[in-house]
Amino acid sequence: MNLRKTIAEDTTRSLRAKDERRLVTLRMLSSAIHNREIDKRGKGEVGEITEEDILGVLRSEAKKRRDAIAEFEKGGRPDLVEKEKQELVILEAYLPAQLDDAAIAATIRSVVAEFGSVGAKDFGRVMGEVMKRLEGRASGDRVSRAVAAVLG
């Protein structure tokens, strides 16, 4: 079953179960996906929105929640921190499982071995290839720190 259909069905279930937090979060997600579809058509791209587009929207929305949590913690707003954390949990349920640090490091070592002798000057090249291979299963921040540690 595709992700868009799953989100729509979960929205209906949340409505029937009167799960307000989940319902609001899924409606916001559906709206963001719809906006991405409109943007795609506006750019002249042909065809339906892809699963990868939807995953991109999910990653973006999850990142917004993480950033909001950090800001609300700085601002001393525990009520809003809790709300954002609940939304983040709901969004992360639709994302692929995140890799652990050991798997990220193994991928980085593999890329470095393929490129041969690399140093700090090759950071961008290594980072780009690693992100391509991980396909959204690790955040850019985590990968960036790991690449910097490996390259020294």
Image (cartoon, helix red, strand yellow):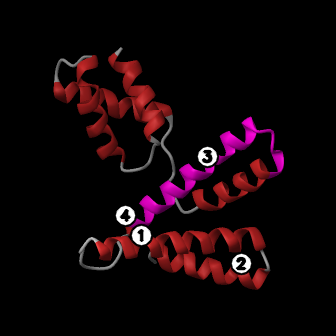
> Is residue 65 rendered magenta in the image?
yes
Name the residue that disc number 1 marks. Answer: 36
CA–CA distance between discs 1 and 4?
Answer: 12 Å
> Which residue is rendered at x = 25% and y = 26% of the image?
112
Residue 52 circle label: 4
CA–CA distance between discs 2 and 3?
Answer: 23 Å
Closer to viewer: mark 2 or mark 3: 3
Residue type (three-letter) at the residue carrying disc 3: Arg
Q: Quadrant of residue 118?
A: top left
Q: Residues within 10 Å of mark 1 (few under 14, many from 20)?
A: some
Mark earlier in primary sequence (1, 2)? 2
Magenta residues, start to end: 52-79
Residue type (three-letter) at the residue carrying disc 1: Arg
Q: Quadrant of residue 67?
A: top right
102 relative to 127 in the view: left or right: right
Q: Residues within 10 Å of mark 4 (few under 14, many from 20)?
A: few
Badge 3 element: helix
What secondary structure prevails in the magenta region?
A: helix
Residue type (three-letter) at the residue carrying disc 4: Glu
**Nearest the eye: 136 or 56:** 56
